[in-house]
Image (tube, coloured by chain):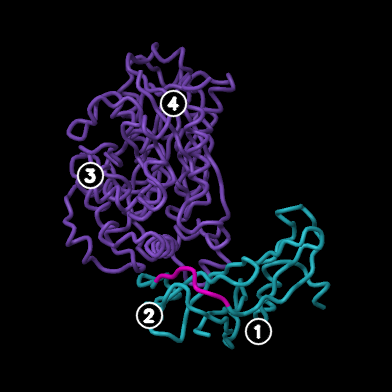
Amino acid sequence: MKGKPLVSIVSAGLSRFGKLEGLYAREIFAQAAKEAFDRCSNLDPKKDIKALFVGHMGESYEHQGHTGATMADWAGLLHVPATRTETACASSAAALRAGIFAVLSGLYDVVMVGGVEKMTHRTTPEVTEFLAMASDFPFEQWHGITFPGLYALMATAHMHKYGTTEEQLSMVAVKNHHNGFLNPKAHMQKEVTLEKALSSRVIAWPLKLYDCSLITDGASCLIITRPEMAKKYTDLPVHIIGSGQASDSIGIYERESLISLIAAEIAAKQAYEMAGVKPEDLDFAEVHDCFTIAEIIAYEDLGFCEAGEGGHLIKRGETKLDGRLPVNTSGGLKSKGHPVGATGTAQAYEIYLQLTEQAEKRQVKDAKIGLAHNVGGSGATAAVHIFRRE
Amino acid sequence: MSEQAPFTIEQFYKYIDQGKLKGGKCKKCGAIHLPPRPLCDKCFSKEFEWIEISQKGKLLTYTIIHVAPSQFQSIAPYAVGIVQLEKGLKIPGMIRGIEHEKIKIGMELTIDFDASIAPSQWPQWPRYYFRPA
């Protein structure tokens, strides 16, 4: 079983990420769907695609729920069974898993999975409030703890225990902005200096503006099928060989650890075991850098380094584009942007590009195995997927 | 009253309103829940008793929130932290009565209670906070 493909990705699509003024979520999802259809000339979407699973976090943004059916219709897939999945910022990793289950069950041969979020038309306080809904209400939100605040609590604890520095946090931002600068679909395609990141205004000490991901509009999708059918659609499928997901207490105060995400550790263990892969076998990874501290904690949770070594890993440059293990080649949530519901399958989109050698200026040489790590909220959900090229 | 009171978050805040910090102790396995739960997550028992939790603890971690939600904007920047109480219990809350620069991990804090009027809409919960012991 180990390393055997669960499903294969035969196509993928990503809308432009950014402030997409005047566009509604369904119109943005249609952009992603169109790209996925155009990439795969052997696919007849109306005939072949049997179901849609779509991640979407919040109906507050557009006063619009019931996202599954809406996105199916706007993607030209009227009448397919369409279901929304919600696990906060990991909503589309959950959609991907729902798609994997649907294909593995034998019920459907070809399924579309994806995610969408339209956020930028709302004010920052409104978005802050909507995002906070993914954290505990009676003890965290009620006492004024924001989302950046929750990750700041983890950052302070990590700095205290391991000596991680604000400079190391800023280095994550500098690296990811460099990668995003090379990604034509990224929200913020510009380099940032360490000085600028370090001197940006405080959001929730020790996290500053450049430690936070972006409020972004965007959509992403994948078309997946049974591995034995993949060649019917493309010469270059990408195989998903490991999938894990776990949960934890909604309130971070109830968790065993404030300096690691146990759900991510469990999800990673499941995915590594299923794939028969070890951290050292990976060629690159997309991790959930909703805040810079989250990327440093991810290095440790995913076994890229020992606990407490995350700050040193970024400082030594090992996760840069030309490093030992490039992380967030897309620019990550930090620079590519974080339309929350779209993020999980947007990470998979980057991995699809890398493993089919379509990542252009940010292509990782000889990339064969990649990992995606998608976290919901402050870590009450985590999902990890491992991908292998044909 | 206390023996009969339901083991709910609503009831936890009613005790806070009386200046009491109380948790639920499972009668079967002894696990203590703060906040209380109606179902023991360790042994699935539904039998509990209320116990008083010591109002003193140590600061585990903290942050200073500068960009606040609308209802807290007038008091930003403000400090919040997670406090380690007795019996392995932890609870988050605001930290007041100390300059932000002087807040240190490991410092001793005590819980205190606002005498403010409860909000008119749901949730009608009072707020507790922490201050130096």
Circles 1 and 2: CB distance less than 8 Å? Answer: no
Between the residue at mark 1 and the residue at mark 2, the CA separation in whole angstroms equals 25 Å
Residue identifier under label 2: B100
Name the image quarter holding residue A123. Answer: bottom left
Circles 2 and 3: CB distance less than 8 Å? Answer: no
Left or right: where B62 falls relative to A123: right
Magenta stretch, main secondary structure class: strand
Residue identifier under label 3: A180
Between the residue at mark 4 and the residue at mark 1, the CA separation in whole angstroms equals 54 Å
Q: Amino acid at mark 2?
A: His
Residue B119, image x and y in percent?
Answer: 58, 79
Mark number displayed over residue A240? 4
Residue B30, image x and y in percent?
Answer: 76, 62
Circles 4 and 1: CB distance less than 8 Å? Answer: no
Q: Amino acid at mark 4?
A: Ile
Chain letter corresponding to the colour purple: A
Q: Amino acid at mark 3?
A: Gly
Residue identifier under label 1: B19
Between circles 1 and 3, the one closer to the viewer is 1
